[in-house]
Image (cartoon, rainbow, N blue to C red):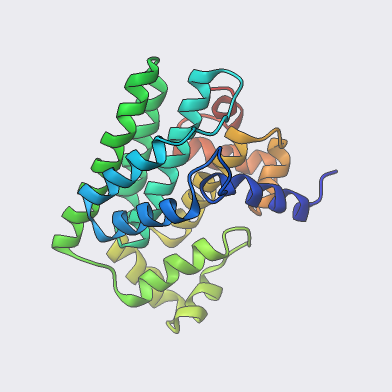
Amino acid sequence: MVKKNDIIEMYQKIKLYYHDESFLHPSYHLEKQLLDYIKKGNKTRALETLKAINRLQRATLAKDELRSIKNSLICSCTIFTRAVMEEGVNPEDAYGLSDACIQKIESLNDKNALKEFEYSMLATFINLKNEQHKNKTYTDEVEKAIQYIYNNIFKQLSLEEISEHVYLSPNYLSTKFKHETGISLSDFINKTKINESKYLLAHSNTKISDIALIFNFCNQSYYNRIFKRYTGITPSEFKNL
């Protein structure tokens, strides 16, 4: 039986895909620049930085080159999604765009078309972020709650724990979170866990039962059900794409 701590360590190593400074991966400096430009809504500089990253050798994420490129773009999509949500983009809109982008990635079977799509995907996420920022931003309490969820994604998070962190009553935070984001707190937690779990599904041989464990789902059956609710497919089907 694989220990949970071992899986977390493996997961964290996998996520160094965008943080490893070896010749196979973009430097941390470039990746940080890209995320900063996304958060600032600077499309021109973000696209320039992505081009600089892509001039480096792309990481090998599968034996088949086409599958490797698709996996790389799914990683990018997940990171773009997180970046715009951290800046207050409605989670439903961010996840909806993420799902549409991943479906598009899977539909493309030309390497050059896939590489070009990464730039369109980046621009679309920045456009979404800029458009929503014209109309509204989340309050400090909701943004703080979202960040707490990201930072504790491996825990079995509860409304009471998060409300205590942001100094609001559970009922008030629940109502406020749903009003501002358009999604319930519990849905946001589950969607975030599912989105993050895709890293392990796509880029490791970790058993699905162990992935369910690392993200604190009560069992694999429940993880399968929640995964299909938000993605339309099972973890096994996603892993075999």
Of residue 195 and residue 179, the one placed in the foreground of this image is 195
Q: In the drawing, does residue 20 fall left or right of residue 131?
A: right
Please, is residue 160 above or below residue 197 in the view?
below
Residue plotted at (62% across, 40% down): 200
Give the position of the N terminus as an image quadrant: top right
Residue plotted at (35% across, 20% down): 112
Of residue 6 and residue 92, the one placed in the foreground of this image is 6
Please, is residue 143 above or below residue 121 in the view?
below
> What percent of the width, then of the height, locates residue 177?
36, 67
Residue at the extreme bottom of the image, as rendered: 167
> In this rendering, does residue 218 appear at all?
no
Please, is residue 178 above or below residue 194 in the view?
below
Q: Quadrant of residue 121?
A: top left
Residue at the extreme top of the image, as rendered: 109
Of residue 170 and residue 206, the one placed in the foreground of this image is 206
Residue plotted at (64% across, 52% down): 12
